[in-house]
Image (spheres, rainbow, N blue to C red):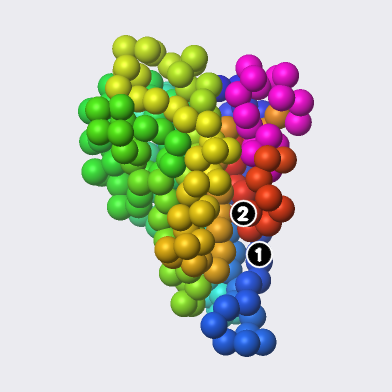
Amino acid sequence: MKKLFTVLPLVLATSAAMAYEQDKTYQFTILHTNDTHGHFWPNAKGEYGFPAHKTIVNRVKAEVEQKGGSLVLLNAGDFNTGVPESDMQTAEPDIKAMNAMGYEATVLGNHEFDNPLQILDMQEKWASFPFLSANVINTKTGKTLVKPYTILNKQDLKIAVVGLSTEDTAKLDNPEYLHNVKFEDPTTVAKATLKELNEKVKPDVKIALTHMGYYYDAKHSSNAPGDVSLARNLNKGAFDYRWSHP
């Protein structure tokens, strides 16, 4: 999948939401990464590497918690496929490093389908955080391949994180590994998932964690809807925040 950068730096945003206690402000900070592509270790030039990421995460977490806030740490997909050290170990070092950093969810990127589904299942077992995608369907069971969303509890706030993956995966990845997988329209699935969440869970904050691409002009997305199309086709405020692959 085309991307703007090989590895994006951690992105920081601080937000407030009203919940439970009237006139009380709840503070939380979101960090997210995407497209790490096996760069769990710094290269010869000292670039990349999860040790540096962990240093940032630890520092920000300490600062946030000192002020009474909470940290949310997310990954927007494509932790697979990049360098031999990771590829030959099917990203086990990457996932274990993400466990150590305290990641709370990842969405499935297109490169999570570069290997047989058995590998993805094994990787999911290694992870102490959920793999998410509401629009990737296991055609054998008719259910989502992984969890559609997860609920995080921060200071008694219910934070719903919904995963959405690019439909372009079906065009980009090895069809040998995709014959039991179907990629449904993210916008349609998002609407249905949000309806379920609003009726059954009633979250205080709703986050779209996507790996769909940012295409202002849909012509550049192989006609597959990206984040801009998703935002345009959902009601205003359907999601409070969107953290995504660029």
Q: Residues within 10 Å of mark 2 (few under 14, many from 20)?
A: some
Q: In the rendered structure, does residue 224 fall within the stretch colored magenta?
A: yes
Instruction: Inspect this view and state whether residue 169 appears.
Output: yes
Q: Secondary structure at mark 2?
A: loop
**Picture coordinates of residue 8, whole percent (x, y):** 60, 39
Q: Compared to 132, does 39 lie above or below?
A: above
- The answer to whether residue 44 is left or right of residue 221 is left
Observer-nearest of 52 and 28: 28
**Picture coordinates of residue 88, whole percent (x, y):** 30, 23
Please state the extent of the stretch shown in magenta in the rendering: 216-231
Q: Residue at x 30, y 22 (%)?
A: 180
Q: Amino acid at mark 1?
A: Thr
N-terminal of the pair, mark 2 or mark 1, is 1
Instruction: Inspect this view and state whether residue 71 appears.
Output: no
| In this rendering, the label closer to the viewer, 2 or 1 | 2
**What residue sits right under mark 2 in the picture?**
239
Q: Compared to 161, does 82 lie above or below?
A: above
Q: In the rendered structure, does residue 105 fall within the stretch colored magenta?
A: no
Q: Quadrant of the N terminus?
A: top right
**Marks 2 and 1 close (CB-CB < 8 Å):** no
Q: Quadrant of the C terminus?
A: top right
Q: Secondary structure at mark 1?
A: strand
Observer-nearest of 134 and 51: 134
Q: Residue at x 64, y 20 (%)?
A: 223
- The answer to whether residue 124 is left or right of residue 149 is left
Observer-nearest of 24 and 79: 24
Q: For residue 214, what is the image quadrant?
A: top right
Label number found at residue 14: 1
Q: Compared to 129, does 23 lie above or below?
A: below
- The answer to whether residue 109 is left or right of residue 2 is left
Q: Residue at x 58, y 29 (%)?
A: 6
Q: Compared to 127, does 219 lie above or below?
A: above
